[in-house]
Amino acid sequence: MESSEHPLGDTSGAAPSPPDVRRAVRSRVAVLVVAIGVGLLLQLLLRHHLADLQARAADDPIAARAQLAGEVRVGGLALFGLTALLGVAWTATAIQGWRVRRFPPSRSWLWGGNRIFTGVQARWVAAFGVVLGTALVACSVAGASITLEMVTRLLTCRAR
């Protein structure tokens, strides 16, 4: 099967030059290293915060449980709210790509520097993007509702 027949074939033209590829790899590795560093720092801070919360729970378990519930509510809704917004943006970009038969569409901030698909290939990619974006929104809504249910049960539990 030739690449022109495949819905995900390469339509971008010339291959990128080696310096461009090296720069792209370096930037992606740098982002990954920074993300890992920030994640490890946040994990350390969270571990200390949870140890303090556990110590507080020894004196006043209901107050500690209420504090934990508030933090889980804010953190969970922020996380799932952001992922839902990303899913909406992803879906909107895919719909726009479907309409203009180009993916990613021009001036798309969500898909910068990627391979460009046109025509039927763009429609295949856009349709897949709509499915993924919609799935991300649905999973975010489910995650937020589970988080709220956990917080509700945590607050209604009066066991010491």
Image (cartoon, grey):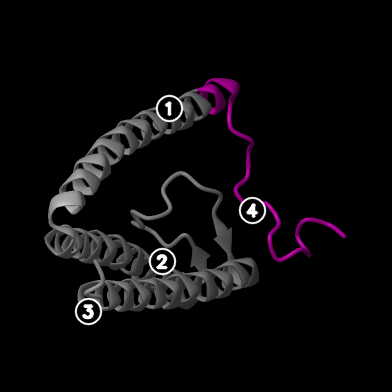
Distance Cα–Cα, label 1 vs label 3: 41 Å
Q: Which residues are magenta?
A: 1-22
Confirm or deny contact between disc 4 and disc 2 (CB under 8 A): no
Distance Cα–Cα, label 4 vs label 2: 22 Å
Residue matched to label 3:
156
Residue matched to label 2:
90
Magenta-span inclusion, residue 149: no
Residue matched to label 1:
33
Closer to the observer: label 1 or label 4?
A: 1
Q: Amino acid at mark 1?
A: Val
User: For the residue labelled by badge 1, is the local secondary structure a helix, a strand or a loop?
Assistant: helix
In this rendered view, identify the residue nearer to me: 17 or 86: 86
In this rendered view, identify the residue nearer to me: 34 or 104: 34
Residue matched to label 4:
11
Q: Amino acid at mark 4?
A: Thr
Q: In percent of the image, x 87 and y 60: which residue is there?
A: 1
Distance Cα–Cα, label 2 vs label 3: 37 Å
